[in-house]
Image: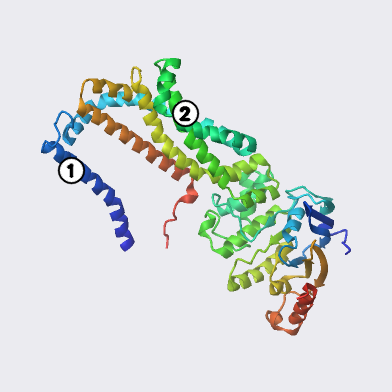
Amino acid sequence: MTKKLQNITNKLSPIAALLVVVALWAAATGFEWVPAFMLPSPRAVLDAFVSDFPLLLQHAGVTLCEAFAGLTIGVLLAFVLAALMNRFAFLYKALYPVLVITQTIPTIAIAPLLVLWMGFGMAPKITLVVITTFFPIAVSLLDGFRSADADAVNLLRSMGAGRLKIFRHVLMPSALGSFFAGLKVSASYAVVGAVISEWLGGFEGLGVYMTRVQKAYAFDKMFSVILFITLISLVLMWGVTLLRYLVMPWERKEKESK
Amino acid sequence: MPTSPDAVLRAEHISKSFGDHKVLEDVSISLQKGELVCLLGISGAGKTTLFNILSGLMQPDSGHVYVNGAETTGQPGKISYMLQKDLLLPFRTVLDNVALPLMLRGVPKKEAREQAASHFARFGLAGTEKKYPDKLSGGMRQRAALLRTYLASDGIALLDEPFSALDTITKGAIHEWYLDIMRDIELTTLFITHDVDEAVKLSDRVCILGGSPGTIFAQIPIEELRPRAHDFMLGEAFLGYKRKIFEALQL
């Protein structure tokens, strides 16, 4: 009984915190602590969100396309590289530091370069998403492979399994948990990466739309885009959680049947 | 020590060193079908190394291993062994864990599952097929691991301290059960233990591995008929065997 109550308070407290923030925001605009043209009220943002919704949806389609394409390629590349690095120790030693270094290069810094190389189409955006999502997934996969129980690997060897079967039956499933943790991070990176690369030029997409409303000083619309991007990221992360639930049935808590 | 040629598992003159450290020296051991032999010894006497060699995971420096008459030295996949840790893969259902060795051998999934499932009742695992291992009790997990070992090894089980993680009562129950099932499925067992009582209670023969480098320096047959009476463990004969073992261990 108390556990149930605790569960409810656990779920309610973040909602309450969010409500407090929105209330403060409404107060700041309502009492004009901040000039209305600089900080639109929650109400105005919501109105802009509703009236712009078809337009936002259209731009989101493009951004999501880029994000998904980039994420898919990023996952595939990360998977291949992590598998190879796990198999060959010299590759691991040679590439792991390089991987870390590539991650310290700020995305925003290379985005203009990609535009110069690849033009204003989707290619530079997808490339940027690949670069940002690739690393967390590669690292989480590598860590996952290494977390596999060495005794379990030996057990399969004693049953006559070769490397490929050991990979399939022990290493891969052992790495799934940390893979999904990496994917969750990468899914939101993917959207943000796509938006940032759109800032620098393009014809469609949430980033393009953002720069457009920015130039018009339409703060309410800026906020509604940000709100929309946040929602998309949340939905994607929730999607990853759902995927994890479906792919890893052994993690589910058994329903009390007694 | 002589090894008989018709044994199901036979190791001859096994020696193994790691660098300068000689771990096993001229170890020979053989098991007849249905026999239960216990390998008793001081920690560090090379018991686990011997198991690794018997299961083909490790190549001995010299010596040979035969399973059912065919040489299997350094070839994994013929006999598998079970550790104190049951090593059930947490991401596979109990049934898929048990069927794994069959699947690895190329038996189609459906057939492997059917074959594995047919043993579940006898191993006291009925109803656990679709569960994941973390939902099972320690004793059940151990039985599932045992079934998997049995299916992996063609009627031979190598057990490395299989029952030592269990509490005394569970252990006692699983001993009885194990002796029953062995007779039932004609299982041949070689197992490692530190527990002298367990060794005398279960075995047909106790092999004492010791020294540095390790070698088998005594084999003590336990000539008590089976099934052994419940008060065997409290009787004079039992103590006699224990005394013999302690003498051999030089304790």
The residue type indicated by label 2 comes to Ile
Question: Which class describes the residues within 10 Å of circle 2: few (<14), some (14-19), or many (20+)?
Answer: many
Determine whether B79 is above or below A224 in the image: below
- Which residue is at the front of the view, B237 or A71? A71
Residue B248 is left or right of residue A153, and the answer is right
Q: Which residue is mark 2?
A: A131
Disc 1 to disc 2, C-alpha distance: 39 Å
- Would you identify the image quadrant in which residue B207 lies? bottom right
- Tell me the SS state at disc 2: helix
Q: Are marks 1 and 2 in contact (CB under 8 Å)?
A: no
The residue type indicated by label 1 comes to Ala
- The residue under the point 57% across, 33% down is A95
- Residue A170, horizontal then vertical, whole percent: 59, 46
- Would you identify the image quadrant in which residue A48 lies? top left
- Residue A100, horizontal then vertical, whole percent: 50, 35
Disc number for residue A23 = 1
Determine whether A21 is above or below B199 in the image: above
* Tally of marks: 2
